[in-house]
Image: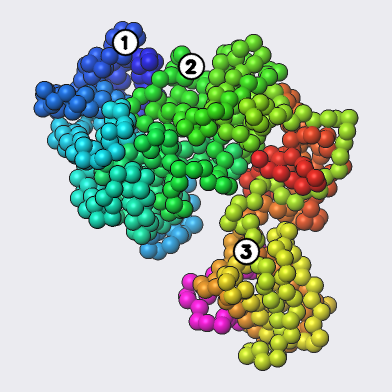
Amino acid sequence: MEFNLLILIYGSLYCGVMNKKIVECFLFVCLLLFLFLSCTNHMQERVAVALNFSKDNKQELEKVLSYYKGQSSKLKAAQFLIANMPYHYTYIGWEIDTLKQLKKRSITEGKISEEVIQRWNYFNFMHLPREYDIHKISSAYLIENIDLAFEVWENRPWSKYYSFEDFCEYILAYRIEDEPLESWRRKYYDRYMPILDSLYQGTDVMEAAQKMADYLKTEGFAHYNDFSLPHLGPLFLLDSRVGYCRENCDIATYVMRAVGIPISMDFYEIAPSYNRKHFWSALIDTTHLVVSFNYEEEPMSRKPRPNERKRGKVYRICYGVQPERIKGIFADKCVPSLFRHPFLKDVTNEYFPDSRVTVELDKTSKDGKAYLSIFSIGQLRAIAITEVKGNRADFDFVEPDVSYFPSCMIEGKNVSAGYAFTLKNNAPDYFIPDATSLVEVTLYRKYPMRSNVKNLGNTCGVKIEGADTYDFMKPELLYEVVDTPKVNYNILKVNPKKKYRYIRYSAPKDKFVELAEWRMYAENISQPITPRNITADHPLSELHRKNLDLMDDNDWVSFYMSEVVGEQLIFDLGKPYKLDHILFMPRNDDNFIHLGDSYELFYHAGAQGWISLGKRMAEDTELHYDNVPEGALLWLHNYTRGEEERAFYMKQGKQVFL
């Protein structure tokens, strides 16, 4: 492990925010590391380098080492923390404090106004100053952290199944990544240790973790992902349960480590199926297999769950510096930052231990490196790196049944280096288009259907009725939704016997109303009818009365959701009308074909990249192409709106997204 390269790259990254004196000091340390560590990684020598870098804080660190003299295990733990400490830091600035308070407000006030969000769109916390742990951390902080970590660990029956290295990474570490340096372990210990002791006295680490996860779920969590911020910190999250999946994992990490349950946080950089980065908690089981979970979701299981999210490649955030995947990679600025991150460990083998693939390359770069990439938001995003061997590239530990693109860096851009493929039985199943055999396709979407909109607002069973009176004593059934709609934009033709003033929308008894758009049209009238009033069969809260407007805002993503299941909405039209049709749009993600939008279909041609099959203006809820090469991987791009797009192929006339 060449720590000189690590420090050199860190030095180059930090020079822009450090004053001249600090830069000179930092470069001096770089030189020391280059001379001192290029041939060794002995812990004592790494500690010595860290002490040299600590400047005025050296005495505090030496106090810790002296305090544990004669206590072999605790001294080794202190050395582990100090040796890796020079590379850990906190971002500081009033901007972070301000945005954290806005997040806190969102717990009680709901979504922050768009005006406030737009005001902070410019903000990038990575431009703020960094405060390094090794220049600030106190001996009291480290000693408390070490002593408490050992105390809980030595009292746990499962600790005997883990190595000292496991203890250091999954219990002892005092920080996750770039959160504030705060004394958290005692507070979390005092709050949650009695809870675990009251809930579980057994020896199964997963059962203990599940009990704590169940309890954490009762404490609630507010999902709010506006504003880009570093990790919010243990003291903030102790009483302000807000954020997105990362913060959910942070909370679990602090709690579990404080009570002696070995845990880390894993993630994928880009989802094989969606466009987002995603984090989850990773319990390190006594079998040394990982048990992934999110305490808000389904119970833990040592067995793979059906229909789990695709991951592709999995990385773990560690405290200790990890070995370079390829020699010299930490200092190579041409390599994507994911692979230059010194604390990331590729742990895909813990999820897919028997998977590997060798791919053929039709294009290579001068640097001799190849990448495994995911296609997302119109570009290739690298998720794995390897060295090229001739015209081949070997990738270990890769999730099956995901669409991958071999790629390489050409003039700073990640470009296709061969045909896309899926992994089947450790062999690539390539998508090779046959330009001599063209087929006709019908397209309905540009992005896979997520579970939260898969049932299109749970509209199967909805009834639409008309009546002369508000009490619907003599209703006429105008329309019943007998099956889940295939698309979001639906025109319901109705043929009422007479004119009606009142129209009722009734959700099935076990389902909520989830309506994105709702418009009623009368015979021989081109404009939709504006209801005089909209009520429900029960009193509506102020928020729900306000949200009724979401059904008529021309935003196909926003939607009204009822407060109770089986709700009935009653539309007072002001006077009787004989309806002709209804625009009915259930809750959706607006990734169906959007009328009036401009689209272009592409197929993937290996090292040539994406080849256009022509542009279309959507005049209906589907697009037709009759010039598609058989066996091709396809991409439908919308020029008008949105960024959620994924590659797919056609099977038995249907789009299959990978």
User: Is residue 573 something that shows in the picture?
Assistant: no
Give the residue type at disc 1.
Answer: Thr
Residue 506: x percent and y percent?
64, 77
The reply to whether discs 2 and 3 touch (Cβ–Cβ < 8 Å) is: no
Q: Secondary structure at mark 3?
A: loop
User: In the figure, 544 relative to 147: above or below?
Assistant: below
Res 485 → quadrant = bottom right
Q: Which residue is mark 2?
A: 326
The reply to whether discs 1 and 2 touch (Cβ–Cβ < 8 Å) is: no
Residue that appears at 80% across and 56% down: 620
Q: Residues within 10 Å of mark 3 (few under 14, many from 20)?
A: many
Q: Nearer the viewer, residue 334 or 172?
A: 172
Q: Which mark is residue 457?
A: 3
Residue 278: x percent and y percent?
49, 42
Q: Which mark is residue 40?
A: 1
Residue that appears at 68% across and 65% down: 585
Give the residue type at disc 2.
Answer: Ile
Q: Nearer the viewer, residue 73 or 276?
A: 73
Give the mark nearest the N terminus, 2 or 3.
2
Image: magenta residue range: 533-555
Q: Separation of disc 1 and disc 3 at Cα?
A: 61 Å
